């Protein structure tokens, strides 16, 4: 039985790798049809086939995750079941047939994490286990969104889709939400972060965060002096120091995110400029060919209804439209 299971896993892994390779090959063919051959109909067919397969795989993954949650529930593993149902609701909200039963199961398990009176040890354990399960689920969600964003950005670099598309913007929002959830989860596992007389302020841009850090540094020096004089307890200083360390970590993350966004914008602009140059060069070539044929028409060697001349004019119009779109996107 174990041998059969291993064989099945190997076959599944091989099939998955083959499917991914076929998708990549189909994407390359679509790009060639769109960019090199200017055959938009065939390019559309290739891209539609990829999207259809992606949607089907997404539906399969959603169903598998829901069945996994059901197995956890039937096996009495309540925390794992809740985490899996939550992933279904968060990551596959478009799959109504499994989202609704997942929500019903979550509703029926709403009291799963209530801490019942018991010893201090059992209470701490009952709180820590759901937190660890939720943390793992949040980490998996973040990893999933990051992978989807990375895959979409590859399509952007290939020129298949636009960085301003609604789907990409939605993915970026999901990524930010997942990162915020990670931060909230980590903060909930730490001791209280602010002293008794500290009023927490909302943290916005890196500039605002830097100002908060400067205020916290001054506050730390003042509290340290009071602790040395015995006017405050050491715990007050430790709480404030924790607040400062978290603010510094968030400041560094904001700077890194800003730099990454700037790099992405610069890369997108460079790619758009290269594509504009390529299209402009192709326009020049097509125009030269049209001029050559029109000379033959003037000499009576060809007619204006010649299929080659008509096709070249259609190609020229398509290239000019594409050039306008690229330049408009670059201005945005």
Image (cartoon, rainbow, N blue to C red):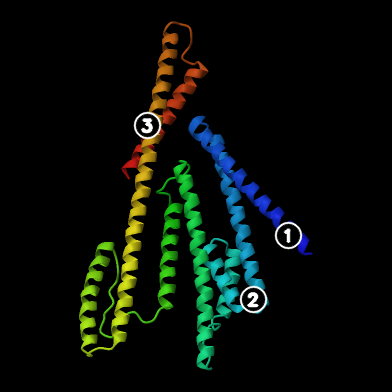
Q: Earlier in the sequence, mark 3 or mark 1?
A: 1
Q: Is residue 93 visible?
A: no
Give the residue pinned by disc 3. Answer: 277
Mark nearer the viewer, 3 or 1: 1
Residue 233 left/right relative to 137 = left
In this orientation, which residue lies closer to the viewer: 48 or 146? 146
Q: Position of residue 124 (x, y in %)?
A: 50, 86
Q: Residue at x 40, y 30 (%)?
A: 279
Q: Residue at x 41, y 10 (%)?
A: 295
Give the residue pinned by disc 2. Answer: 73
Q: Residue at x 57, y 75 (%)?
A: 82
Q: Earlier in the sequence, mark 1 or mark 2?
A: 1
Question: Distance of mark 3 from mark 2, alpha carbons?
Answer: 58 Å
Q: Residue at x 35, y 62 (%)?
A: 253
In this orientation, which residue lies closer to the viewer: 124 or 330? 124
Residue 321 left/right relative to 68 = left
Sort mark 2 into few (<14), some (14-19) or many (20+) by Cα contacts within 10 Å.
some
Question: Distance of mark 1 from mark 2, alpha carbons?
Answer: 26 Å
Q: Position of residue 33 (x, y in %)?
A: 53, 33
Q: Earlier in the sequence, mark 3 or mark 2?
A: 2
In this orientation, which residue lies closer to the viewer: 122 or 90? 122
The answer to the question of whether label 3 and label 2 lie on touching residues, with beta carbons closer than 8 A, is no
Secondary element under disc 2, as helix, strand or loop, is helix
Q: Position of residue 238 (x, y in %)?
A: 32, 81
Give the residue pinned by disc 1. Answer: 6
Q: Position of residue 129 (x, y in %)?
A: 54, 80
Sort mark 1 into few (<14), some (14-19) or many (20+) by Cα contacts within 10 Å.
few
Q: Is residue 323 above or below residue 292?
A: below
């Amino acid at each position: 039985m174990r041998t059969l299971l291993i064989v099945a896993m190997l076959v599944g892994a091989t099939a998955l790798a083959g499917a991914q390779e076929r998708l990549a090959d189909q994407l390359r063919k679509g790009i060639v049809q769109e960019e090199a051959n200017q055959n938009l109909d065939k390019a559309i067919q290739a891209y539609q086939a990829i999207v259809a397969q992606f949607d089907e795989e997404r539906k399969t993954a959603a169903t598998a995750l829901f069945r996994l949650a059901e197995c956890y529930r039937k096996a009495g593993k309540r925390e794992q079941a809740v985490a899996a149902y939550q992933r279904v609701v968060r990551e596959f909200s478009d799959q109504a047939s499994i989202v609704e039963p997942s929500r019903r199961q979550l509703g029926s398990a709403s009291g799963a994490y209530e801490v019942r009176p018991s010893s201090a040890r059992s209470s701490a354990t009952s709180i820590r286990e759901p937190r660890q399960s939720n943390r793992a689920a949040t980490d998996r969600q973040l990893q999933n969104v990051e992978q989807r964003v990375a895959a979409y950005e590859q399509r952007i670099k290939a020129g298949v889709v636009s960085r301003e598309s609604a789907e990409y913007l939605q993915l970026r929002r999901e990524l930010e939400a997942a990162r915020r959830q990670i931060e909230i989860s980590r903060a909930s596992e730490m001791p209280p972060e602010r002293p008794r007389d500290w009023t927490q302020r909302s943290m916005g841009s890196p500039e605002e965060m830097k100002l908060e850090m400067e205020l916290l540094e001054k506050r730390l020096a003042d509290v340290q002096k009071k602790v040395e004089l015995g006017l405050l307890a050491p715990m007050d200083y430790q709480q404030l120091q924790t607040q400062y360390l978290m603010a510094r970590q968030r400041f560094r993350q904001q700077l890194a995110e800003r730099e990454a966004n700037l790099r992405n914008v610069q890369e997108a602009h460079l790619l758009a400029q290269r594509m504009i140059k390529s299209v402009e060069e192709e326009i020049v070539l097509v125009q030269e060919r049209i001029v050559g044929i029109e000379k033959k028409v003037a000499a009576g060697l060809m007619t204006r209804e010649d299929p080659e001349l008509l096709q070249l004019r259609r190609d020229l119009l398509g290239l000019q439209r594409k050039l306008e779109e690229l330049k408009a996107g670059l201005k945005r």
